[in-house]
Amino acid sequence: MAIEIARPGKTSLIVQTPVMPAAGTLGFADEYRSLIDYASLGALVTNPTTIAPWRPTAGTRVVPLDAGVLAHTGLPNPGLSALVRQYRRAWAKLPIPVVLHLLGTTPAQAKRAAKLLDAVDEVAAVELGLGDDVGVDEAVALVRAAATVEKPLLVRLPFYECQELARPVAEAGADALVMTAAPRGTARDAEGGQLVSGRIYGPLIKPLVLRMVGRLRRELPADLPIIGCGGIHSPTDARDYIEAGAVAVQVDAATWAQPKMLERIARDLGGWIATRHADALLDEWHPDMEPAKAPHSRGTS
C-alpha cells in the first residue's frame, strides 16, 4: 500500500505504511533494531538535529505524571554535519525512508541545512520543527528558508500555536504538516523536589490534537497532507486520526513503554496484522505475530 505524504511537485515521499515514530522517539538511526522491525514502519523520523551541537540538559529529565510523563532532554545532538557523517551508513541500510528532523533556529541556519541535506541521498525528506513561542512572521521566514531544499519538507507545528500557524506555514512552502509537537508543561520532581519544565506525553493529548486535525483538514487545501501526532497508544487511536483527515500518524511515548506497540500499530494500519483464529490457543497466537506464522487451515474469527 503506497501512500504519498507530501504535496505533489517535489520528489515525492512515498511510504508503504502510514505509521512512523515521532521525532525524539527512536534516536537517530537503528538504535531500536533489537526491539522493533523497522521494515514494518513507513519511515524513520530522527531525533531533532541542529546546525551546531547541543548538549543534554542538566538535572531531572523525566517526571512521571498521573496520566503520562513530562520529559526534558535538551535535545542533545552532535550538530548536522557530524550527524550525517556518523549515521549516513546506518541510514543507507535501513529498509525505510529517513526523515531528518531539523530544529528551526534561524532562517540562515535553515537554508544552510537545506543545502547540506540536498547532498545527502540517504535522507529522503526533512521535517522542520518550529519552536513553541514562534510568531507567524518568524515561522514563515523559517519555512521559506528550509523550503529551498529539493526534498519534501514536512513542518511540525507547535501545540499551542498550531491553528494560527497552519495556513501561513502551508503557503510559505510546507509540503505536509505534522500536528503537533507535544505541549509544554511544568511538574514537580518527587525525588528532587524541584519544578521541572518539559514536554507532556500521554493519552490525554489525543482528544485535543484530534480536534485540531479535523478542524484544519476542513480549512486547509485538500492537497496538503496532514500527519497526526499526539497521544497515540493503540491502533484504534491511530485510526481515529486517519478518520479525522490525517494521511499518516507519528507515535511517540507509547514506544518507550511498549516498543512493539509502534510495530503493532504500523502492521494494523498497513493491513499486515495477523487475524486470530477462532480455535487458536494462547501459545499459538499473539498480537505481534507475523501473518505468515498464523495457522491457515482453520476458520478465523
Image: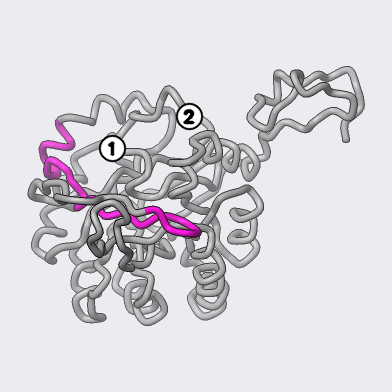
Q: Quadrant of residue 185?
A: bottom left
In the image, 145: left or right of 287?
left
Q: In the image, is 3 to the left or to the right of 155?
A: right
Mark identifier at residue 42: none
The one of 237 and 62 positioned closer to us in this rendering: 62
Rendered image: mark on residue 28: 1
* Image spot of residue 173 (x, y percent): 31, 68
The residue carrying mark 2 is: 36
Q: Quadrant of residue 168?
A: bottom left
Q: Nearer the viewer, residue 44 or 279?
A: 279
Residue in view at x 8 percent, y 49 percent: 52
At 27% from the left edge and 65% from the top edge, which residue is drawn? Answer: 130
| Vertical position of residue 127 compared to residue 46: above or below | below
Give the Cα separation between the discs numbered 2 and 1: 14 Å
Visible residue check, residue 109: yes
Q: Which residues are magenta?
A: 64-85
Q: Amino acid at mark 2?
A: Ile
The residue at the point 59 percent across, 53 percent down is 238
- Marks 2,1: beta carbons within 8 A: no
**Which residue is nearer to you in this view: 11 or 271?**
271
Could you tell which of marks 2 and 1 lies nearer the N-terminus?
A: 1
Q: How is the image coloured?
A: one colour
